[in-house]
Image (spheres, rainbow, N blue to C red):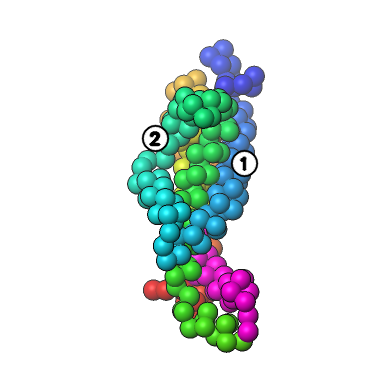
Amino acid sequence: MGEDAPGPADRMTFGRALAFLLRGFVLTLLVAAASLLLGFLVSIPVGIVLNLPGGVVRLVLRAVVDFIRGTPILIQLLFVYFGWPLIPVVGVSLSPIAASILALTVNSAAYMAEVVRSGLMSVSPGQRLAGRALGLRPWQVFRFVVWPQAFRIAMPPLMNSVVALIKDTALISVITVSELIANVRSVVSVTWNPAYYLVAAVLFFIVTFPLMKLAGRVERRMKERGFAND
């Protein structure tokens, strides 16, 4: 739990407990931020391939994405942490934080890739034809015509994916990461005061609620401008 973790002999004040929880919450947010950035970068090419008409690569990615989206993130975390070193090709153990980031990255990439694919499909084929009629190359049509519209459409569900990812970080304590949930369990084990779980919930809410409101606002503005689907 770390050098500053509460112990049975400590006099646990609310201020000290809160500081301990905040240290864990900072780690929670850092893991979420790293996973979000990596997951988004992976989701773009995967979403583009999923939007293609066919091919072996698309079929493989489709199966992988469906499998990840159809299995619990908790199982994925446990597999990456405990099972990753057992894979003959890999054979390398990951630290708890590295395993958390890898599992959350893969999970969030699968969900965001589906959002990207849906956004690309929402762009009218006429937009592509218009771009070609103007003399643009296929990559220019995608870069300047298709992608800007698809990204606007995808923004609200992408932001919802961010909220889901932040909440999913509550599970990484099961692989011994000393984040918020692990720290709050330590505090409760010393103080016997379950109210600290409510403190943890409030910390999550402080971060996720503005994101949820922002996602709703962006979605309404996109609908007003004719970008978002009902």
The amino acid type found where label 1 is placed reads Leu
**Quick one: label 1, few (<14), some, or many (20+) residues within 10 Å?**
some
Q: Nearer the viewer, mark 2 or mark 1?
A: 2
Quadrant of the drawing holding the C terminus: bottom left
The amino acid type found where label 2 is placed reads Ile
Residue found at x 53% / y 14%: 8
Q: What residue is pinned by disc 2?
A: 75
In the displayed structure image, the side of residue 72 where residue 201 appears, left or right: right
- Residue 134 horizontal/vertical position (percent): 61, 86
- Residue 130 horizontal/vertical position (percent): 55, 85
Number of on-image labels: 2
Residue found at x 58% / y 33%: 98
Residue found at x 49% / y 26%: 88
User: Nearest the camera: 10 or 75?
Assistant: 75
**Quick one: label 2, few (<14), some, or many (20+) residues within 10 Å?**
few
Examine the image and state in which quarter residue 141 appears: bottom right
- Residue 20 horizontal/vertical position (percent): 60, 30
The secondary element bearing badge 2 is classed as helix
Is any atom of residue 18 visible in this view? no
The secondary element bearing badge 1 is classed as helix
Which mark sits nearer the N-terminus, 2 or 1?
1
Residue 45 against residue 189 in the figure, above or below: below
Quadrant of the drawing holding the N terminus: top right
Is any atom of residue 3 visible in this view? yes
- Label disc, if present, on residue 30 of the rendered structure: 1
Residue 196 against residue 126 in the figure, above or below: above
Q: Which residues are magenta?
A: 135-158
Residue 35 against residue 99 in the figure, above or below: below
Q: Is residue 7 magenta?
A: no
- Residue 70 horizontal/vertical position (percent): 35, 46
- Label disc, if present, on residue 72 of the rendered structure: none
Residue found at x 39% / y 35%: 75
